[in-house]
Image (spheres, rainbow, N blue to C red):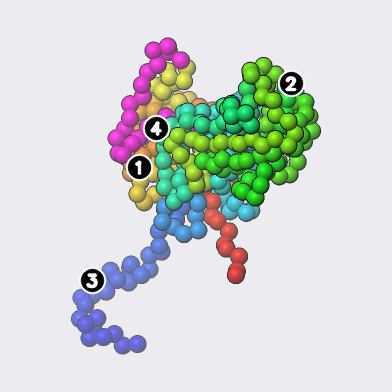
Amino acid sequence: MRCPRACRALPALAWFALALAAAEPPPAAVTHTNYAVPAGPWSVQVVRLDRAAAGWELRSAHAGGQAVGLAPLSVLAAALPPAAGAPVAALNGDFYQMERAFAGHPRGLQIIDGELLSAPSGGVAFWLDAFGRPHATNVVSGFLVAWPDGSVSPCGLNEERLPAGVVLYTAALGATPRPPHGRELLLEPAGPGAWLPLRAGRTYSARVRESRSGGEGPIPAGTVVLSLGPALKPAPNVATGAVVRLVLATTPSLLGAKTALGGGPVILRDGEVLKARPDSAGAYESTTMFERHPRSAVGWNARDFFLVEVDGRQKQFSVGMTLEELGAEMARLGCTDGVSFDGGGSAALWYDGAIRSRPSEGHERPVANALVIVRRPPAPPR
């Protein structure tokens, strides 16, 4: 093919630049880097996801695909169901209950593909709204049960129930034993409206199919269990066939959110590194903010998401960072916003089938949940 006269007039250097540009592959949607900073010393793991890349998604996952349980990050990521997409990278997520029957219950909010797994605690959560835009805010629970007599009770979700508490249990609880004392109401949909899975910002009308002793029997498909503690006062008088309302409101509203994961605190906001505020009581959660520990965090700017992990507690290799140091490092990477996740022995980053970080305990610690980058499966042909 002959080139037009205008093309033939291009200088040889310009032709070389055009040829070089044509030969360069397009930038990868997901990249992984590991670099050392001698000043720490620090070893930093970074996975970047192009927010505009088609076919990729940032989603949360929980150990065993349920609301309670623990698993190493490598197991958790590899066990994602095929319908969720192919996992490429994962970062450990929220703080979690470590003992007893509900070990692995997140301390804060978790949403997987729009389904509520746990209730917000009032602390910081990272979440993606209905348009896929990232947020890091304190999320306050407005979960409650509205009884037929007009009274209401605050309500938890898939968590350990207190003697005077009310907790809603869904099929996501799996085989975890429910509290044996108190009363359970087995609920089914009351009418044709939206039902399961439960979603934030919705109100559900539910009919009492059965009232029974606490902890008895499985949760049948298409139902949920409302567990009432034996010390609940006043104890609602709810008969079989009665209709209750389940209000799953939050502040701010998370209506339409597909992904959410608790953590905190926020360490970077609009390009500004936030300074941690000490607790006058000297609580452990406060003092560790100013100490160097292994750290995990998610960050973003207008173009990219970043999964960041800093190894620590290994003197000659990587000593870990304070939260302020982590915020500064993420700003240097190009993040405008960032929120930390669980650190210490839980901090780990998985990429392309293997743990790339060096856990401080010499092995992976089982964790409750994670933030995962997946390549979505192709849409089925129409």
* Residue named by callout 3: 13
Determine the image quadrant of residue 207. Answer: top right
| Camera sees residue 15 | yes
Of label 3 and label 4, which has the lower sequence position? Answer: 3
Residue that mark 1 sits on: 335
Write the residue at 50% across / 58% down: 55
Q: Amino acid at mark 3?
A: Leu
First in sequence: mark 2 or mark 1? 2
CA separation in Å, label 3 and label 4 = 49 Å
How packed mark 4 is, by other alpha carbons closer than 10 Å (few <14, some 14-19, many 20 or more), is many
Cα separation, mark 1 vs mark 3, equals 36 Å
Please state which of residues 11 and 169 is positioned toward the viewer in this rendering: 169
Residue at 26% x, 85% y is: 4
Relative image position of residue 72 (x, y in whole percent): 61, 36
The label shown at residue 266 is 4
Q: CA distance from mark 1 to mark 4?
A: 13 Å
- 260 relative position to 336: left or right: right
- Give the magenta part as a residue range: 262-283
Q: Which one is earlier in the sequence, the residue at label 3 or at label 2?
A: 3
Identity of the residue drawn at 42% across and 29% down? 265
Q: Is residue 107 in the magenta section?
A: no
- List the single residue furthest toward the bottom: 2
Instruction: Report, in whole angstroms, how far the alpha carbon at label 2 lies from the one at label 4.
Output: 39 Å
Q: Which is more foreground, mark 2 or mark 4?
A: 2
Q: Is residue 323 above or below residue 114?
A: above
Which residue has dot 2 on it? 181
**Mark before the other along the chain sequence, 2 or 4:** 2
What type is the residue that disc 4 sits on?
Answer: Val
> Residue 334: x percent and y percent?
33, 44
